[in-house]
Image (spheres, rainbow, N blue to C red):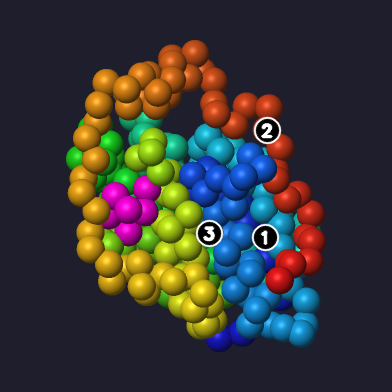
Amino acid sequence: MPQFRSFVAIGDSFTEGVGDDLADGSVRGWADFVAVGLAQAAAPERVTYANLAIRGRKLGPIIDEQLEPAIALAPEMISFNGGGNDIMRPKMPTDLVVSRFRGAIERIRAAGIHALMLSGANPTDHLPLGSVFDKRGVALTAALVDLADQPGVTFVDNFSDVGLRDIRYWSPDKLHLNALGHARVASNVLTGLGVAVPTEWGVEEVAAGPAGEKGRRTAAYYREYVLPWIGRRLTGRSSGDGRAAKRATLEPVAL
């Protein structure tokens, strides 16, 4: 498997890194972890990394707003994930989502760039109406699996990672991964790319620990997380409104 020395990530909150909050108010996330893993494997050669993902984006805006700018940066690899926010809407046009996803992967490949295609982690054990969203996620993932057989594509199926559904990997909103969850996704990605996972992340040790107890959805949980989400849906707002990409250009990865 080739070692990639330039990497651009596009997507929504999953790829931006929401849930893996740093002390300065910024977010890190799996893509940042992957960039560090690639840089450690390539040292002393330099690896550059950009992240154009913005929280709240549905698949259409991810493709319309982020895909061509990512290709224009001419990286060796682009990671593409989307559809999580489509799954959470009252209705999801599965055929349209699948068609647009396929088109994006084809566009990346046509540009001579390796496509890292990945599914998001599955939060539905912990969410209201989780069984409905789970069925949609399963159907979407199954519809995209055959893309992995194409040259120039690596597919990492986090949605089917059963261990990642454990509450230990999720932030208080139960929708976004925490730092442990993002590190596990990064481990899945690096393994899929044939790159060693840094032992200091402790991913295997965490996975070997006892499972967490399923969290209760209290009235406070609904007030803090569910009602604001419903309010944004009813008013046509998004958590990503007014936000810009956190790392808009290819920059060297610091080790």
Name the residue that disc number 3 marks. Answer: 30
Name the residue that disc number 1 marks. Answer: 8
Observer-nearest residue: 41 or 1?
A: 41
- Labels 3 and 1: the sequence-earlier one: 1
- Labels 3 and 2: the sequence-earlier one: 3
Observer-nearest residue: 135 or 33?
A: 33
- Labels 2 and 1: the sequence-earlier one: 1
Name the residue that disc number 2 marks. Answer: 243
Prevailing secondary structure class for the magenta stretch in the rendered image: helix
Mark 2, Cα crowd under 10 Å, few <14 / some 14-19 / many 20+, is: few
Q: Per the image, is 167 magenta?
A: yes
Instruction: Judge depth for marks 3 and 1 and give the one in front.
Output: 3
Label 2 amino acid? Arg
Magenta-highlighted residues: 164-170
Q: Per the image, is 239 magenta?
A: no
Instruction: Kindly state the secondary structure of the residue where label 1 is placed.
Output: strand
Image position, residue 211 (x, y; %): 23, 59
Q: Residue at x 78, y 76 (%)?
A: 46
Q: Is residue 193 visible?
A: no
Observer-nearest residue: 8 or 114?
A: 8
Q: Is residue 252 visible?
A: yes
